[in-house]
Image (cartoon, rainbow, N blue to C red):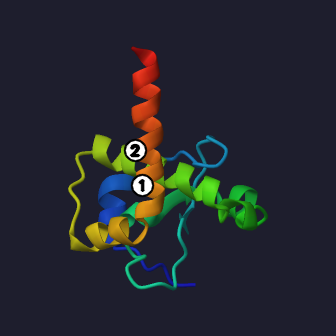
Amino acid sequence: MANSFDESLLKKYFLYNYECWVCGKNHNNVFHHICGREEEGNSSILNAAPVANEECHLWIHPVLCMNENKKLLLKKTMKYLLEQGYSFNEVDKKFIEKHSRFYEDILREDTTRRGNET
């Protein structure tokens, strides 16, 4: 199945990342589409999660598609990309707007966590 992500962005930002975001081991070999691939705008690199296809993707795919897991993967992807100096493009901005419910939850949880640390 063809990958809908911009290959140049994947190479630029994930070339030296070997971690599978499901198990944490250094053996990723595909990118999971966190919020699916069919919908318009889901080609954003923010929708990409590096995973090990055989071990951690195919057999657990229905679990990865649960909203709580989508939120965890979206948060990890955004954090990782920002740490790499990534700047959002128009496709990303539309993706964030389309999936704002996840990002609002992420921001709310992070704000609450930071408030509890003080």
Above or below, 15 against 53 in this view is above
Amino acid type of the residue that numbered disc 1 sits on in the rendered structure = Tyr
Residue 38 located left or right of residue 83: right
* Helix, strand or loop at mark 2: helix
Above or below, 15 against 80 in this view is below
Q: Residues within 10 Å of mark 1 (few under 14, many from 20)?
A: some
**Near-viewer residue (18 or 33):** 33
| Residue 111 falls in image quadrant | top left
**Near-viewer residue (13 or 80):** 80
Are the two marked residues, 2 and 1, in contact with CB atoms closer than 8 angstroms?
A: yes
| Residue 90 falls in image quadrant | bottom left
**Near-viewer residue (97 or 69):** 97
Quadrant housing the N terminus? bottom right
State the image coordinates of residue 16 (x, y, percent, origin top left): 40, 47
Residue 34 located left or right of residue 111: right
Mark sitting on residue 48: none
The answer to whether one can see residue 76 in this image is yes
Q: Residue at x 45, y 47 (%)?
A: 106
The answer to whether one can see residue 15 in this image is no
Residue identified by numbered label 2: 107
Q: Residue at x 54, y 45 (%)?
A: 19
Q: Residue at x 67, y 60 (%)?
A: 64
Quadrant housing the C terminus? top left
State the image coordinates of residue 99 (x, y, percent, origin top left): 43, 67
Q: Residue at x 21, y 67 (%)?
A: 89
Amino acid type of the residue that numbered disc 2 sits on in the rendered structure = Leu
| Residue 96 falls in image quadrant | bottom left
Residue identified by numbered label 1: 103
Above or below, 28 against 111 in this view is below
* Helix, strand or loop at mark 1: helix
